Image (cartoon, rainbow, N blue to C red):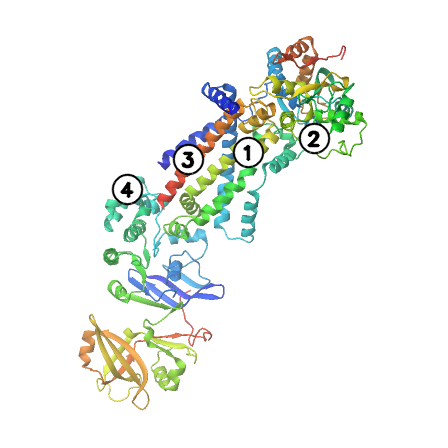
């Protein structure tokens, strides 16, 4: 018990004293995760939208595939992308392995099915009348799409936030593709794993507190957004 | 100018035929009511007229132009027509933004947008609501804003799907008044669906009846099995009246529009049995506001009532002139478009006696 | 409200995207090194690399893994240099043409850690092989790293030296109930040995860290130490540029030569963990 309280106390001291190592790790984590989320959203939202509104053969199959990919473990993605980005792999010449960009590639693959899948369900939930209304008021295909996405914005935003929460707290991809290089690819989760390996707890606990704070902030944001959503309906 | 010309328009969903219209023409600058029970295809027809749904087959002309159902070609045509849904849905933003939507889409200048929006809201009496969140209005308010939103697009055709369904009584009156005002509008045609014949009467000059996806006579009371008419020997009389362009199969039904039956007192005009008139006995007469509903029993060859009851609706003045009372024997004439053949579900549509022609 | 919210997001996103991801520009002098968890977890790298940077202006990005994975990174050309401790495999690595040359840099040693009361009575064993035999005989818990690391390789060598019957994984055949292969790093293995009152082979650095470096302390003691078989030499090998043209061989060679230079050896020798030296300079003349 003494041990835990002492670690906590030291962790808080570290947080308050704005320890540069700690905050650099937080910065790397946030930057990589935001980047992954941004790219996955830029790809996943249009993809999910198209799947939701188009009628095509095998649509159910595609949705089932997306839902299956949701459960893909991070280490599987890590392994797959490692094989791709390793110098011996197909994209080895890019020299991306053990860089933040490699983590972003893996994390984008991790959350693309999330963003796309949740966009599909968010857009599918949108009343058919929105499409009809936009069209009858003179909207072209793109304008109609924008009108529908606008109505689904809360659901989509929720999925983006959930995706961000997923990448910031994952470790498999960051460890395997980033390599936990100090001051370069060391993220909150990989740093915590290393500290555990070292038998150190102070930095790990401090990072844990930051991670919890980020998760809490994301959840509050999600609640607020869903609150608007509920009210707005 | 012809607004819409439809020929052989069919809308099928799998094996189910939702709409099957032989021929329908709608003129410009008139208010037209679309009547029929639920599920009769009113909404489907409105969606086709709004060019939101492509009919499975048939020829569709809009403002003299044969419509090509390709998105690029449709867009400019669709911008002349606006449909207001039965339960209109509002974009989750302010009333002002909702009404401005069509203008934004059309790239209207911001200053003009604001002016037009306020004008349109004014016309539906909702100008005080501009800044309100549109998706939290009541049913009646929503309907009014939806009409304003449609008007902002200054359409040539305004289609309204059951404009007063789901609207409280006070707002029903307001919505009817708005529609009535719009009918006097130049350069805009109004077509609305309703299941309320009185509303149709109040607001429209023309009525189109739909039943099971087909154009039909309005009153289902005047619906007879052709086989029954044949047995009573009445089918022959009716055929002689020259109302049918197609052969009516034994298994089909004939509907007769009650408003298109003319009643003549016996001995008035032509004496005795006129070949183009049908003898009948007056059973009952009911006043319905300024109109009178007359229930008749059609006479067979022997001159007695044969049990086939027919309802006619005519203006009170018109009936008063004939001096008829229940028990009288009268003679009936049908307007040329009074009868409609309703083919039974199983019977196939027979070929047209004379081909329907339309301009190419 | 929504509008401000979206603007806020836009600002964050542009901020994130504006900062370059991979800071390595053309003229920056950076090499990537795969190494063992022990060099990183012991804190040596945090002491050594800044000194190297101060002398040469070269940044070394270290990826800490098990020896097997670290060598594998070299074999795949994913790093410029490897710094590990498994002499046999390192030599093969050079022989197979993956590395240019193996430099002896330093050694540290393994110790057999166990409960204070030494239930298997290994303290007075004549050599490390006898100590292991005694553990097996007493069937006291033994925690094996089981992760293909250098430490794990050493465990296996010790088991072979005992002459006990082993299975094809190099584990004692009658290991059920006392031999636990956990597949984790040194730290977790030490913690587990403490929990299970068992013995384990540990590098001295990690042990010292657990013993003296933490507020909560660590009960197990070094029970047996000092045998030659417990020495753990570290080698550094630049990855062969003939094999992988993209590797930064010049800077890797610079780092290797710095490590074995007088200056580098002095830095290594001066590193202490909680008042105890950890690594012993081992550079050979003329290498």
Q: Is residue B7 above or below residue C119?
A: below
Marks 1 & 3 on one chain: yes
Q: In this view, does B331 lie above or below A140?
A: below
Are there few (<14), some (14-19), or many (20+) residues within 10 Å of tag 2? many
Give the spatial CA distance, label 2 vs label 4.
69 Å
Which dot, 4 or 1, sits closer to the camera? 1
Q: Residue B185's image quarter?
A: bottom left
Marks 2 & 1 on one chain: no
The residue at the far right in this view is C163
Compared across the picture, whether C244 is left or right of C161 comes to left
Asked if the residue under mark 1 is in contact with the one under mark 2, i.e. CB atoms within 8 Å, the reply is no
Residue at 49%, 35% in the rendered image:
A165
* Mark linked to residue A170: 1
Rendered location of residue B49, percent (x, y): 38, 59
**Mark 1 or mark 3: which comes first in sequence?**
1
Compared across the picture, whether B291 is left or right of A218 comes to left
Name the residue that disc number 3 marks: A220
Give the spatial CA distance, label 2 vs label 3.
43 Å
């Amino acid at each position: 018990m003494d041990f835990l309280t002492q670690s906590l106390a030291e962790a808080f001291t570290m947080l308050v004293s704005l320890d540069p190592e700690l905050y650099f790790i937080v910065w790397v984590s946030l930057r990589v995760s935001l980047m992954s989320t941004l790219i996955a959203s830029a790809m996943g939202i249009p993809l999910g939208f198209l799947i939701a509104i188009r009628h095509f053969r095998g649509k159910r199959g595609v949705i089932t595939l997306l839902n299956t990919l949701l459960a893909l473990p991070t280490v599987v993605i890590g392994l797959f992308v490692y094989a791709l980005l390793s110098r011996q792999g197909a994209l080895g010449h890019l020299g991306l392995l053990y860089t933040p960009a490699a983590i972003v590639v893996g994390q984008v693959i991790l959350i693309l099915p999330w963003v796309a899948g949740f966009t599909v369900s968010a857009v599918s939930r949108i009343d058919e009348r929105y499409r009809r209304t936009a069209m009858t008021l003179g909207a072209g295909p793109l304008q109609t799409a924008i009108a529908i996405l606008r109505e689904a914005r809360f659901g989509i935003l929720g999925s983006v936030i959930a995706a961000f929460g997923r990448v910031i707290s994952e470790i498999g991809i960051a460890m395997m593709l980033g390599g936990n290089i100090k001051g370069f690819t060391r993220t909150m989760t990989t740093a915590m794993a290393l500290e555990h390996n070292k038998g150190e707890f102070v930095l790990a606990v401090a990072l844990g507190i930051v991670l919890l704070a980020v998760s809490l902030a994301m959840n509050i944001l999600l609640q607020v957004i869903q609150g608007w959503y509920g009210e707005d309906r | 100018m012809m607004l819409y010309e439809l020929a052989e328009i069919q809308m099928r969903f799998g094996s189910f035929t939702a709409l099957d219209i032989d021929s329908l023409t709608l003129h410009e600058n008139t208010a037209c009511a679309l009547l029929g029970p639920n599920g009769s295809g009113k909404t489907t027809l409105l969606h086709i007229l709004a060019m939101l749904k492509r009919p499975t087959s048939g020829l569709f002309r809009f403002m003299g132009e044969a419509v090509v159902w390709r998105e690029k070609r449709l867009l400019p045509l669709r911008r002349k027509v606006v449909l207001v849904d039965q339960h209109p849905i509002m974009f989750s933003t302010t009333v002002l933004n909702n009404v401005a939507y069509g203008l934004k889409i059309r790239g209207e200048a911001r200053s003009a947008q604001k002016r037009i929006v306020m004008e349109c809201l004014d016309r539906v009496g909702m100008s005080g609501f501009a800044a309100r969140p549109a998706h939290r209005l009541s049913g009646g308010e929503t309907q009014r804003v939806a009409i304003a939103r449609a008007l902002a697009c200054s359409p040539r055709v305004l289609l309204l799907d059951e404009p007063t369904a789901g609207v409280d009584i006070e707002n029903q009156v307001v919505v009817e008044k708005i529609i009535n005002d719009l009918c006097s509008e130049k350069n805009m045609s109004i077509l609305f669906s309703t299941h309320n014949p009185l509303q149709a009467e109040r607001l429209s000059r023309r009525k189109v009846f739909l039943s099971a996806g087909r154009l039909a006579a309005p009153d289902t009371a005047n619906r007879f099995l052709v086989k029954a008419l044949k047995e009573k020997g009445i089918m022959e009389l009716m055929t002689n009246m020259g109302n049918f362009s197609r052969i009516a199969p034994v298994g089909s039904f004939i509907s007769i529009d009650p408003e298109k039956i003319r009643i003549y007192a016996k001995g008035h005009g032509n004496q005795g049995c006129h070949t183009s008139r049908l003898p009948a006995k007056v059973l009952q007469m009911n006043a319905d506001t300024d109109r009178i509903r007359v229930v008749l029993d059609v006479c067979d060859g022997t001159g007695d009532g044969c049990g086939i009851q027919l309802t006619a609706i005519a203006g009170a003045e018109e009936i008063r002139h004939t001096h008829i009372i229940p028990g009288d024997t009268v003679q009936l004439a049908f307007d040329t478009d009074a009868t409609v053949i309703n083919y039974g579900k199983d019977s196939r549509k027979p070929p047209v006696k004379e081909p329907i022609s339309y301009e190419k | 409200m929504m509008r401000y919210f979206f603007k806020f997001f836009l600002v964050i996103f542009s901020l994130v995207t504006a900062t370059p991801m991979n800071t390595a520009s053309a003229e920056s002098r950076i090499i990537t090194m795969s190494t063992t968890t022990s060099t990183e977890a012991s804190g040596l790298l945090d002491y050594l690399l800044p000194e190297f940077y101060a002398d040469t202006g070269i940044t070394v990005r270290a990826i800490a893994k098990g020896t097997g994975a670290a060598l594998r990174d070299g074999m795949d050309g994913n790093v410029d240099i490897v710094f590990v401790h498994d002499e046999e495999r390192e030599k093969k690595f050079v022989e197979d043409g993956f590395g240019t040359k193996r430099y002896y840099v330093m050694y540290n040693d393994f110790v057999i850690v166990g409960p204070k009361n030494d239930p298997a009575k290994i303290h007075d064993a004549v050599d490390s092989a006898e100590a292991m035999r005694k553990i097996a005989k007493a069937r006291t818990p033994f925690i094996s790293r089981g992760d293909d690391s250098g430490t794990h390789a050493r465990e296996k060598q010790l088991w072979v030296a005992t002459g006990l019957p082993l299975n094809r994984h190099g584990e004692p055949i009658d290991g059920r109930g006392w031999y636990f292969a956990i597949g984790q790093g040194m730290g977790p293995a030490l913690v587990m040995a403490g929990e299970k009152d068992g013995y384990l082979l540990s590098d001295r650095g990690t042990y010292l860290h657990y013993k003296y470096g933490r507020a909560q302390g660590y009960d197990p003691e070094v029970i047996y130490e000092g045998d030659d078989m417990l020495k753990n030499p570290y080698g550094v090998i630049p990855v062969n540029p003939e094999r992988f043209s993209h590797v930064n061989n010049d800077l890797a060679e610079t780092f290797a030569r710095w490590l074995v230079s007088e200056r580098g050896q002095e830095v290594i020798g001066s590193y202490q963990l909680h008042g105890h030296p950890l690594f012993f300079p081992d550079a050979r003349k003329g290498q």
